[in-house]
Each structure stands twice: as C-alpha cells, then as structure tokens.
Amino acid sequence: MLQKFRKDMIADMANNDKNNNCAVHKTSIGGQAVMEGVMMRGPHNVATAVRKPDGEIVIDNMPLGKVRTGKFVKLPIIRGCVNFIDSMIIGVKSLMYSAQFIDVDEDGNPTEQEPSKFEAWLEKKLDSEKAMNVVIYISVFISLILSVGLFILLPALITGFLKGVIKSAPVLTLVEGIVRIIIFISYLFLVSLTKDIKRVFMYHGAEHKSIFCYEKGLDLTVENVRAQSRLHPRCGTSFLLLVMIISILVYSIIPWDAEKFASIPLIGHALAALPWVITRLLLRLLLLPIVAGISYEIIKLAGRYDNIVTRIISKPGMMLQLITTNEPDDSQIEVAIAALKAVIPENKEEDKW
C-alpha cells in the first residue's frame, strides 16, 4: 500500500509540475467539493453544481456579498481573516444546498433525502430562507467548536503532560504544533476511508482538474479536464496545513507558565487567575485571525510566483492532497465543468490571481 502511495505521489507531482509550467492564466477562482457536486467561487458569484439522482445537473447561482466585494477585504492580513470566515459560511451553504435533495447510500449511489425534523420544525416557525440561514450559522458554529476542541484544545492538553519533562517553552510549542499536524493528517486519512468521503474527494479532484484546464487556456471538455493533475498549489487543504505551520511561530509568544501570563498588558492578571489550558486556548483564539491572515498572504505569494521557495512552500500541502483528492470519473468532471463555467467572468482580468 505504501509503495503504491509512493508511486502515485511521484506520478501526480510530476504531472502537477507539468501543469503548473503550462499555466497561461493563474485564476483566483476556487472551489469546494460538496455532496455529489462542486462549488465554484468566482470574482462576482458562487455556483454550486450538483448531479441529482436522475442524472440531471442543477446549478445554484448566487452573487457574492458586499463583504467579499468591498475594499476592506483587499487589505493585507485582514483579507485573509475575512476570507477564512466567509469561505466557511459559503462552504456550509453549498453543502446544505447539495444535501437538501441528495444523499449517498451504502453502495455509493445517490438517493433522495427528506428534510430532518429540526429543519421541518424551523420551516414551520420561519420561512424557508430564514430557516436555512439558521441551520447554516448553527452548522458553522458547531464546526468551529469541534475544530477548536480537536485541533487547538486537544494538542494543548496532550503537550501539557510534557511540561514537567520539557522546560523550554519554544520546544513545547513546537511539540504542540507537531501534535496538531499529526491529529489533522490522521483525521483526514481516517475520514478518507469512508465511502461517502471517497466520493466527495473524487469531486475535489474534479474541481482541481477543471481549474487547471481553464488556467491552461484549453476548452473545458471532459477529455481535456481528465488529463490534468488533481493536485493544485492553491488548494484550501494547503492553506489549512500552512495555518498549522504558521501557528507554531505565532503561538511561540504565548508562555506556558501561568505566572508569566501576568506580564501581558491589560488582561494579564485576569488570565493568570484562570487554569493554564483555558488561558492558552483563549490566547490562541485571539491570535487565530493573525495566523489565518499571515497564511493567506503566503499562499497568495506562493500562487503568484514560481520558484524554488514557493515550490517548497506548496509541496507539503500538495502532498496532503494525495489524501483529500481522488481521481474523478467523467460524470463528476461534467459537474465540475458546469460549476466552473457558471463563475468565469467575461473579462479574464477580473479573476486574475
């Protein structure tokens, strides 16, 4: 299994280098795989294409909000924070859209899905649009809570047991970061083994292939898209991994000893009175927007230039995509093409990276 994984990695990396070198138009269009579909986000709108159980491809097209198109999001660091939160909301909306009429059964075949009792109750109390917004924001909140618990709180607790052995604060922060990355990769690997997620990761591969095809200036046909690499240097998976790496550097300023918290201006004494793990959790949450902002700027630079430094930055995230993407079939490629065509602007300068 490991030998096959190594061969696939070498082949995909070689194919990716070839695709990257042939790109004639690096686009800012990005997307996300959803249930039996693909969401694409362009400079003006978001399109979610889903294949229904009867084979028909349906597209939900909605304009970007003022937050995405305003001048505020163009400011460095700040745009990364805004993009991080906005992407989560758009992603959940797209997932909810695909899930409202499509599910996947045990054999991996799409089936109709009835609204849940909670969704039905909300629709009785509110109109359908307001009910959907409530579900979306609850889903985002729950996702944030689970992510904080799994990728911030758990690594801090595990590393806390080593405080008596490791006295160096930078080393403790490094260990904590490594633990976080191990948990993250392990989580992705385990979910990738399920049938449902395997299909989602196939659509993820279709999304990357279609974007590569568009960047090379080729016609968006199944044949042209199929020939592209499923690994893309500007993938959201790469961004998340980079966030975890950058967090090691940023979080190194947070002390591990409770008494040292008192030296923090304004809030130091209040933090020192709390349990150390709660204090570290709160400080990490406060610094998370900065981490996301820095990571976003690095991803922007890595996507804009092609040299040895940017390739080194991109490689870890692209290797992780060997887990989060699978080779799609032709029907899934058709869905990705439909979503991409719906967001391509008439003026290509508008979606330039």
Image (cartoon, helix red, strand yellow):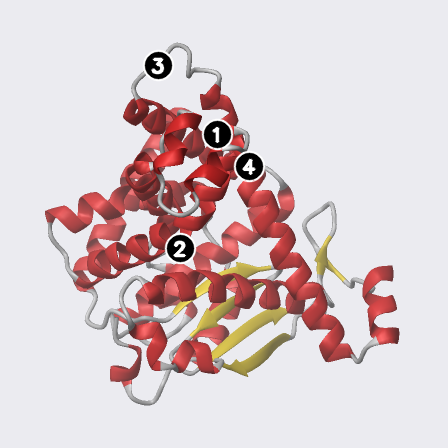
Instruction: Tell me the distance, in whole angstroms, between the alpha carbons under discs 2 and 3.
Output: 28 Å
* Front-most of residues 304 and 68: 68
Above or below, 140 relative to 316: below
Q: Are marks 3 and 4 in contact (CB under 8 Å)?
A: no
Q: Position of residue 68 (x, y in %)?
A: 42, 76
Q: Position of residue 310 (x, y in %)?
A: 17, 51
Marking on residue 166: 3
* Residue, far left: 307
**3 vs 4, front mark:** 3
Instruction: Tell me the distance, in whole angstroms, between the alpha carbons under discs 1 and 4.
Output: 8 Å
In the image, taking residue 321 as reference, residue 297 lies left or right, namely left
* Front-most of residues 148 and 267: 267
The amino acid type of the residue labelled 3 equals: Ile
The N terminus - image quarter: top left
Above or below, 150 relative to 50: above
- Number of callouts: 4
- The answer to which of marks 3 and 4 sits earlier in the sequence is 4
| Rendering quarter of residue 352 | bottom left
Instruction: Tell me the distance, in whole angstroms, between the alpha carbons under discs 2 and 4.
Output: 18 Å
The amino acid type of the residue labelled 2 equals: Pro
Mark 4 neighbour class, 10 Å CA radius: few under 14, some 14 to 19, many 20 or more: some
The amino acid type of the residue labelled 4 equals: Leu
Q: Position of residue 199 (x, y in %)?
A: 58, 51
Q: What's the residue at 32%, 72% (across, down)? A: 214
Q: Which residue is mark 1?
A: 155
Instruction: Tell me the distance, in whole angstroms, between the alpha carbons under discs 3 and 4.
Output: 23 Å
Q: What's the residue at 56%, 72% (across, down)? A: 49
Instruction: Tell me the distance, in whole angstroms, between the alpha carbons under discs 1 and 2.
Output: 19 Å
Marking on residue 289: 2
